[in-house]
Image (tube, rainbow, N blue to C red):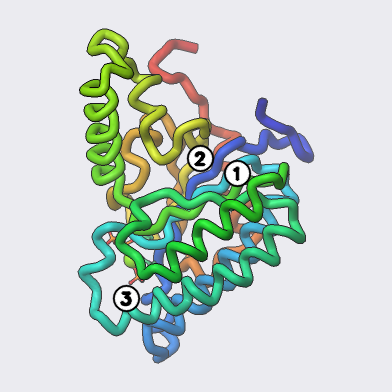
Amino acid sequence: MEKEREGMVIPRHVALILDGNGRWAKKRGFPRTMGHKEGCKTVEKTVEIAARMGIEYLTVYGFSTENWKRSAEEVGALMQLFRYYMVRLLKIASANNVRVRMIGDRNRFDKDIIEGINRLESETKENTGLTFVIAVNYGGRDEIVRAVRHLLADYQAGVIQADGITETLLASYLDTADMPDPDLLIRTSGEIRLSNYLLWQLAYTEIYVTDCLWPDFNKEELEKAILAYNKRERRFGGIK
Ligand code: IPE
Ligand code: IPE
Ligand code: MG
């Protein structure tokens, strides 16, 4: 059920494409990695704000399957930030009753990062507040391909039958199994595209794009997005 706060309906699941770290840094004459560092701080703050607002699921796009195309220097810096923030996140999650979950193919990361992800998930799994989902080495198409491979293996093992393949069954093979679809997608920095994010799950999600660069995102920006969401009329293909 959606919650109400100060007369506003709070979306149960907010998905975020946090874009614009590079542009934020460039504007200030800093290296791109400075933008990523600031962006990580904004992620921390956003988790706390979302937890307090009573949002149930917050899913952020941290690193896409296409982001490996960036320079070795930038990818390396992102991995280092990831290592550092995984440790911080454990503290923030514990302090705010947040459950952390990662989606995407973690197998491509270094062993210590994989262990860090596993630890973050297992140590926060009993928390009952916000579920904070981080999409890393995530691509919507890659997720669907991995789901189909897994489904086919179960078919070959006789676990499922061809006529049992439904939307619900396929969704249960995705990384987001058991999660509701996002109600609201927010993309920062003005680009109006999905960039391979949650392709299956966003089928009926309301989309909000702001020009605000990700490191500048704050509580007011989130409230503006939720206010815009409240003015939308969701029809899901029906007639109101
Ligand atoms: C988003 O910021 C963070 C990641 C994709 C890792 P960008 O790095 O894409 O920033 P811009 O789009 O170049 O400004
Ligand atoms: C999307 O941003 C991916 C993440 C935010 C992690 P990009 O900056 O990679 O997307 P494009 O290249 O502008 O589509
Ligand atoms: Mg970008």
Residue situated in front as seen by the camera: 181 or 19: 181
Label 1 sits on residue: 226
Q: Amino acid at mark 3?
A: Val
Q: Amino acid at mark 2?
A: Leu
Element marked by disc 2: strand
**Lateral position of residue 236 relative to residue 216, left or right:** left
Number of labels in the image equals 3
Residue most extreme to the front? 157
Disc 3 from disc 1: Cα separation? 32 Å
Q: Amino acid at mark 1?
A: Ile
Q: Which mark is residue 184?
A: 2
Element marked by disc 1: helix
**Ligand 2 contact, mark 1 (Cβ < 8 Å):** no
Badge 3: residue crowd in 10 Å (few <14, some 14–19, many ≥20): some
Residue situated in front as seen by the camera: 96 or 123: 123
Nearer-N-terminus badge (2/3) = 3
Image vertical order of residue 182 relative to residue 219, above or below: above
Disc 2 from disc 3: Cα separation? 29 Å
Badge 1: residue crowd in 10 Å (few <14, some 14–19, many ≥20): some
Q: Quadrant of residue 112?
A: bottom left
Badge 2: residue crowd in 10 Å (few <14, some 14–19, many ≥20): many
Report if the CB atoms under discs 1 and 2 are less than 8 Å apart: yes
Report if the CB atoms under discs 3 and 1 are less than 8 Å apart: no
Residue situated in front as seen by the camera: 84 or 119: 119
Label 3 sits on residue: 75
Q: Residue at x 34, y 47 (%)?
A: 197
Query: Where does residue 99 sit, x and y in percent of width and height?
Result: 64, 49
Nearer-N-terminus badge (1/2) = 2
**Ligand 1 contact, mark 3 (Cβ < 8 Å):** no
Q: Residue at x 51, y 56 (%)?
A: 118
**Lateral position of residue 136 relative to residue 180, left or right:** left
Which of the two discs, 2 and 3, sits closer to the camera? Answer: 3
